[in-house]
DNA sequence: ACAGATCGTTCCCTAAGGGAACTCACGAGT
DNA sequence: ACTCGTGAGTTCCCTTAGGGAACGATCTGT
């Protein structure tokens, strides 16, 4: 449909969207994260068109978020796995899930729960400052131009 | 283009994507967050088509993420502001920015910096467990079915 | 030989995005 | 009174991306 490329913008949010901003991409990552990692199973789980799934997987592999691995030689069979780069995107998925749980509940409660292995509790993510570990949300920050800002 | 609706899926990530998953929506939120809050200025800043901007703003207002406020009566003029629901989506933007800074740098460093007011340091967000405050990332959790899981 | 599984391609159709021109309501300058 | 400028959208046409379903390739088990 003649879509504007986000990758060249001077904005880390836009550059992230360039990688996973297209429809379906985050859901594909979610599936791979929870172990639905083969073409047909992702297709069946999401109900995505096979054509689009092909395109998305190819792009996600190209950008280094997913890795395509042959798990069986003679009928060549492939599975997809998160790279380190992709694993860090799961942060994003967990924040999305937390927001959806809070603001887009259909009345039945959360579809999935996350248990934090370190403390054993069913929990959710919270954003903290990487420096002082105090909460860090929209109102707690000032936005400043950085070194990569547009001239 | 005949797009699958995500809102009815049994998945909080999909339901979040239903609200801000379309191209441009996160960037519109970012603009409003940093104070670019009027139609023409958003349009100029992003280079988005006016038609699509109209649609996105309408949807974001409908879903309660943005609020449309008349700030001047006689030539009726409007501005957009984040609601509480929208303000919590900024969490998502900050995580996107952190990922983009780390994995999609163009070599010039981050375009913007976030200064945490509580400690005064230029910092970034980190995900912690809402229960025990220890780090909580992809490998630190078990995914369990919740009460709203598909039957 | 034939069904079955896996992983895609190819085709057509519809609808969404891009871009530019147009509208409408007002306010200011001369 | 007339023109110019501005904010906030609308409307129109064109291209392209997504949906859906059929088709293809490759190997296994029986």
Image (cartoon, coloured by chain):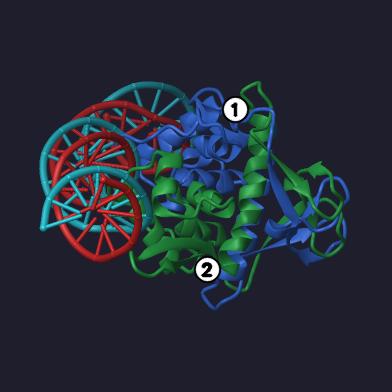
Chain colours: A blue, B green, C red, D cyan
- The vertical placement of A45 against C19, above or below, is below
Picture disc at residue A64: 1
Q: Secondary structure at mark 1?
A: loop
Q: Secondary structure at mark 2?
A: loop
Q: Where is residue A143 drawn, in percent x and y?
A: 68, 46
Picture disc at residue B150: 2
Q: Where is residue B81 drawn, in percent x and y?
A: 52, 63
Q: Where is residue A98 drawn, in percent x and y?
A: 65, 62
CB of mark 1 within 8 Å of CB of mark 2? Answer: no
Which one is in front, C7 or C30? C30
Residue B8, visible in the rendered structure: no
Residue B49, visible in the rendered structure: yes
Which one is in front, B65 or B143? B65
Q: Where is residue B141 drawn, in percent x and y?
A: 76, 54
Q: Is residue A141 left or right of residue B31?
A: right
For residue A146, which quarter of the picture? top right
Q: Is residue B75 left or right of residue B114?
A: left
The residue sitting at 55% across, 23% down in the picture is A73
* Quadrant holding the C terminus of chain A: top right
């Amino acid at each position: 449909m003649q879509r504007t490329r986000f990758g060249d913008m001077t904005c880390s949010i836009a550059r992230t969207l360039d990688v996973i901003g297209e429809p379906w991409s985050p859901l594909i990552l979610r599936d791979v994260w929870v172990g639905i990692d083969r073409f047909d199973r992702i297709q069946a789980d999401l109900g995505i068109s096979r054509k689009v799934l092909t395109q998305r997987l190819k792009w996600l592999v190209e950008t280094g978020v997913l890795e395509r691995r042959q798990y069986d030689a003679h009928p060549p069979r492939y599975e997809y796995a998160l790279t380190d780069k992709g694993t860090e995107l799961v942060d994003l998925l967990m924040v999305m899930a937390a927001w959806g749980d809070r603001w887009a509940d259909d009345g039945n409660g959360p579809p999935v729960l996350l248990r934090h292995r370190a403390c054993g509790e069913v929990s959710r993510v919270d954003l903290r400052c990487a420096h002082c570990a105090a909460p860090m949300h929209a109102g707690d920050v000032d936005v400043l131009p950085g070194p990569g800002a547009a001239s």
